[in-house]
Image (cartoon, rainbow, N blue to C red):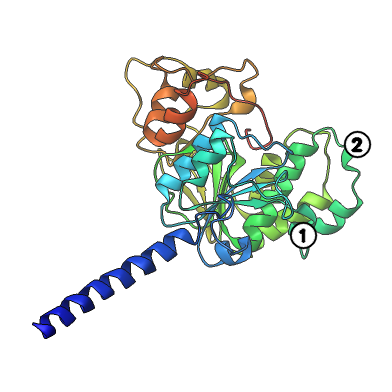
Amino acid sequence: MLKELQLSLSVILLLACGFLYQFTLKSSCLFCSPSFKSQQGPEALLSHRRGIVFLETSERMEPPHLVSCAVESAAKIYPERPVAFFMKGLTDSTPMPANSTNPAFSLLSEIDNVFLFPLDMKRLFEDTPLFSWYTQINTSAERNWLHISSDASRLAIIWKYGGIYMDTDVISIRPIPEENFLAAQDSQYSSNGVFGFLPHHPFLWECMENFVENYNSDIWGHQGPGLMTRMLRVWCKLEDFQELSDLRCLNMSFLHPQRFYPISYPEWRRYYEVWDTDPNFNDSYALHLWNYMNQEGRAVVSGSNTLVENLYQKHCPGTYRDLIQGPEGPVTGELHPGNK
């Protein structure tokens, strides 16, 4: 009888220890800021795992629903990869509070593989060709500074850490199988809204050098898609795409326009229209919604059955549920440097 009692007590003690251990693991982050689930900085987090990178180069700290959808959809498509959102308005000394009332932050903070980091451009540009340019330029005199600084930052981040950069109006729908790639808008023109490379790829280093040597902020896109296009022409002899095949050049790929731009920018309003039959986008990895073109402020409206509403429901259901169907009703997309 005594042995049975001792055995029972031992089992109870083991169960209690196991419960206490699990509770300790869970409670250790009960009061952690949702912005920093991990104590790792971007160097440790991104250098060892090929991450997905988004940028916000304005001081804005309230991401609109399109940004939330872009980040959520990427986290959903790449569950084993870190999704890093670098924000200029976020600093080491003023991280997002754990009880943030912003619905987008609350939503994104609940996603295990989403991480928010401060965007410190001076630190980011160190040890790159962009550092001397950045430390000498008068940012207040630059008319398109938010966009130009975004163009520069994405080059430096992917060069340093590797991974995939995406604009914050890009909805991911299936994994991109390529490591080193640029996204074509047509056979002779590259975008910089989506691209991916392994760390320290020489193509990005040469892009940063050309960024500085041929700097011209008065020409729209000169430091962005224009830069990618002219450097691609230096590296590769561009040919026309054959049907839906991608182009290969040295150790990188120039991906067919259907991969990200099945709806071209002149037709951007089609995203906000009702289709007789929704397209399947079987040849696409992600969809660029061209939010910069949306000067009309077209909205995602609950119950409208537009293409964009259906995309939200399928690829960023949390954003659709919490931000589109929320008590305040639908809100329009706002323009910012990551929405091109």
Say what secondary structure mark 1 lies in. helix
Residue 291, position as x, y percentages in the image: 60, 27
Residue 150, position as x, y percentages in the image: 71, 43
Amino acid type at circle 2 is Ala
Instruction: Tell which residue pokes out farthest to the bottom in this image.
Output: 3
Give the residue at x 47% y 24%.
Answer: 326
Q: Which residue is mark 1?
A: 123
Give the residue at x 91% y 43%.
Answer: 138
Residue 168, position as x, y percentages in the image: 58, 38
Q: Which residue is mark 2?
A: 141
Task: Please tell me how crowded label 1 is: few (under 14), some (14-19), or many (20+) other residues with Cα within 10 Å.
Answer: few
Say what secondary structure mark 2 lies in. helix
- In the rendered structure, the answer to whether residue 122 lies left or right of residue 85 reads right
Report the quarter where the C terminus lies.
top right
- Give above or below for 247 relative to 65: below
Report how far apart the C-alphas of labels 1 and 2 lie in the structure.
Answer: 22 Å
Kindly tell me whether residue 311 is visible in this rendering. Answer: yes
- In the rendered structure, the answer to whether residue 292 lies left or right of residue 281 reads right
Give the residue at x 22% y 79%.
Answer: 10
Q: Marks 2 and 1: in contact by CB < 8 Å?
A: no
Kindly tell me whether residue 186 is visible in this rendering. Answer: no
Nearest-to-viewer mark from 1 and 2: 1
- Give above or below for 297 relative to 185: above
Amino acid type at circle 1 is Arg
Residue 91, position as x, y percentages in the image: 73, 51
- Taking depth in this image into account, of 74 and 39 the one nearest to the observer is 39
Task: Please tell me how crowded label 2 is: few (under 14), some (14-19), or many (20+) other residues with Cα within 10 Å.
Answer: few
- Taking depth in this image into account, of 14 and 95 the one nearest to the observer is 14
Instruction: Tell which residue pokes out farthest to the left in this image.
Output: 1
- Taking depth in this image into account, of 302 and 95 the one nearest to the observer is 95
Give the mark nearer the N terminus: 1 vs 2: 1
Count the marks.
2
